[in-house]
Image: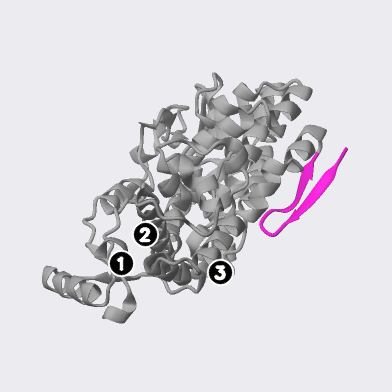
Amino acid sequence: MEKVFRDSIHGDIFIHDEIFMEIINSPEMQRLRRILQLGGAQFAYAGATHTRFTHCLGVYHIISQFLKAPDFEKISAKEKKIVLLAGLMHDIGHGPFSHTFEKISNRSHEEYSADIIRNPEGNISKILKKHKVDPEDIIAILEGKYPNKVLNSLVSSQLDADRIDYLMRDSYYCGVNYSSLDTEFLIRNVRIMDDKIVFPKKTIHAIESYLLGRYHMYKQVYEHKISTAFDVTLISWFERIIDLNEKGYKFLDDRINNYFSYIFNGQNIPIHLYLILDDFTMFDIMKSCQKENDHILNDLSDRLINRNFLKLKEADEFKIREIKTLLKEEGKDPKYYFIEPKVKKPSIYKDGVTDGKDQTIYIVDKNNVVKSLTKFSLLANTVKLIEDEKTIKKYFFPKEVM
């Protein structure tokens, strides 16, 4: 068999095995068409409407290109299939608005991915077992625990198929040009040594370009003030829902209790309900909340629907007190309307193991000695200095109080 997906980034993506089409056509994967890749960035970049679904296809494609490299011929057909499946399904557990929902559910998309893949009542496990593939092998790769470490690195490392695709895809759809990666050159020269994916010294400039592009994408796209403002406003919206629930408030929309009562009680959302949630569902709940009797909830809902998010500003201590006073005078509780977000510094590159996954980019010199990128690259070391820069305190509050 042969199926072809025409992709904006990679051109034609070919599928040659029925198992992949069955997974792609499953409700669990089709749900990813309704989850945008960049969450709140859609409000900063008009073209950023690409989905987790297209990204997953892109990751599948890049892994398939790596597997054509000479050194990957030693990998068995069975392992090639499971690593392609892992790439295809690596984001199957993402919630609405991608990473933003993790701050609401207090559970990572990786954990939900594992649950969805092994769910005996779902479609994924049944399809895999029908084709004699163990779901736990897929999960092991996603968690970085599969015995063949090369497969783990293909899906999740500092220079993996996931990051290559999302940098290329996000750059294209946001209309910026920070991530023109020399992917074909890197893949053509990739090698396997000592159970590691390694790159020859001549690829260092291409790798540095990749790291620099990643840094600029974080600064210009992933940390854009409008994208962050959406996240902050959404979290305030849900904080108000939690507080109202604790007070015994009766929501007009029954879906709030149906979907979120588990979060209220410190539990995980059951898979059958979690799979109903996507960007469309959440926006529809927000629209219904515009009619709630609580003025804070309907105001925050209106801000989310009409792109009137809390606004980012730098402020000194005196100005902070002044703003909080103005908010109280206008009946706006600072708990929901004056937010100091927790700043998470972007990790652009760092040698070593993080969360059980080897994050080192390995370079092989002319003597066939494998060393980390930081032994050769001034830029890789400079990135660490950039990451250690002090962050300026920033706050979010309604722009009308300024």
Q: Which three-letter amino acid code belongs to the residue tagged 3?
A: Gly
Question: Quadrant of the image for the C terminus?
Answer: bottom left
Whether residue 174 sits left or right of residue 398 in the image: it is: right
Residue 12 among those drawn in magenta: yes
Residue 189: x, y in percent? 59, 39
Of the pair 391 and 381, the residue shown nearer to us: 391
State the residue lying farthest toward the right: 1
Q: Which residue is mark 2?
A: 236
Q: CA distance from mark 1 to mark 3?
A: 32 Å
Which of the marked residues, 2 or 1, is nearer the chain's N terminus? 2
Magenta stretch in the rendered image: 1-15
Query: In what element is the residue under mark 1?
Result: helix
Task: Residue at 44%, 67% (x, y): give it.
Answer: 293
Q: Is residue 397 visible in this depiction of the protein?
A: yes
Residues tagged 2 and 1 counted as in contact (Cβ below 8 A): yes
Q: Which residue is mark 3?
A: 175
Residue 55: x, y in percent? 62, 50
